[in-house]
Amino acid sequence: MTAEVAPITDAHVAAVADFLHANLNDRVPWELACSAVPWKVEAPNHGFMLRDGQRVVGAFLALYSERLVAGRVERFCNLTSWCVLPGYRSRSISLLTALLAQEGYHFTGLTPDKGPQEILAWFRFRFLDTSAVVVPNLPWPTLPGRTRISADPDVIERTLAGTELELYHDHAQALAAHHLVLIRGQDSCYVMYREVGCHNVPAALVLHVSNPDLFHRAVIPLTRHLLVRHRLVATLAELRIIKRKPHLSFKRNLGPTMYRSDSLEPGQIDYLYSELACVPW
């Protein structure tokens, strides 16, 4: 079968969304997930697709961002959902090569399945350390008033400043991101997380922590809040995000994540501005 590779433009979003709904996951609001990201960026496309005539037979989505890293503006391309109909699988790699042919980007693949992992590794993607912990969310008694936890946008706006406030503004409308601030005295910590399944129970996956020290001091009221207010029974967090293992937590490796860059180190790659914040599943 013959098919051509083409960039996904705004005009193609509805057709690609219908394709992914029918062939990948019917629970994801694909048209919203494929549309413009909530942060400001001049994205060249929404990824690439395979078309046989006017019919979409494959797609590889991408999210773009521009970020300040070590004093320099760096451009990122987050490779997300990759789906090709069986009769066209021989052309799957052409979608990846079209994305990687775009010059000047650092590429990330944050949720690759086993097959794509092997392909990405062949294309010089490296694995990140995903050593993590699971913290059971338990209804611990807490001292009233010692730690304030809020998801109120007005409280978050008043509490954050500088880079953290900019991160919040960029992700406030992201479909999968949830936002909290922890406040204790003069200290505050911005926590961004998404909801995931962990052994078939609902859990919080931490995407960002602005103040790891306060995160650890407030981990008991935080996990209690996630249980009581959001019915999440566990919290998952990578050690490279929270820096050390909390008490009463269990070690666990999360799914593999990968990146390709000629200049950035592993510690300069994170989960912001990505599918983990933007694509609910």
Image (tube, rainbow, N blue to C red):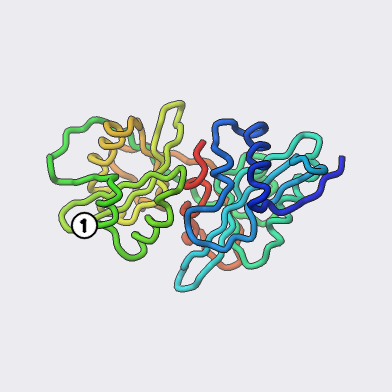
Residue 77 x/y as whole percent: 59, 57
Q: Residue most toward the front? A: 11
- Residue 223 position (above or below residue 49): above
The x and y percentages for residue 4 are 81, 49
Which amino acid, mark 1? Asp
Residue 121 visible in this rendered orientation of the protein: no
Residue 195 to residue 160: above or below: above
262 displayed left or right of 6? left
Q: Is residue 242 visible?
A: yes
Residue at the far bottom: name it: 71
For the image shown, how many numbered marks are present on the structure? 1
Q: Residue at x 28, y 33 (%)?
A: 229
In-front residue for pair 199/278: 278
Q: Splitting the image into 4 quarters, where does residue 149 fall?
A: top left
Crowd band around label 1 with a 10 angstrom C-alpha radius: few (<14), some (14–19), many (20+): few
Left of 58 or right of it: where is 188? left
Q: Residue furthest right?
A: 1
Q: Residue at (64%, 60%) from the top-left corner?
A: 44
Depth check, front residue: 251 or 207:
207
Front residue of this view, candidates 45 and 210: 45
Q: Residue at x 46, y 54 (%)?
A: 272
Q: Secondary structure at mark 1?
A: strand
Residue 190 position in % (x across, y down) = 31, 53
Residue at the (16%, 37%) spot, across then down: 142
Q: Quadrant of the N terminus?
A: top right
Instruction: From the viewer's side, name the closer residue of 196 and 212.
Output: 196
- Give coordinates of residue 122: x percent, y percent: 70, 52
Q: Is residue 100 above or below residue 57?
A: below
Q: Which residue is mark 1?
A: 187
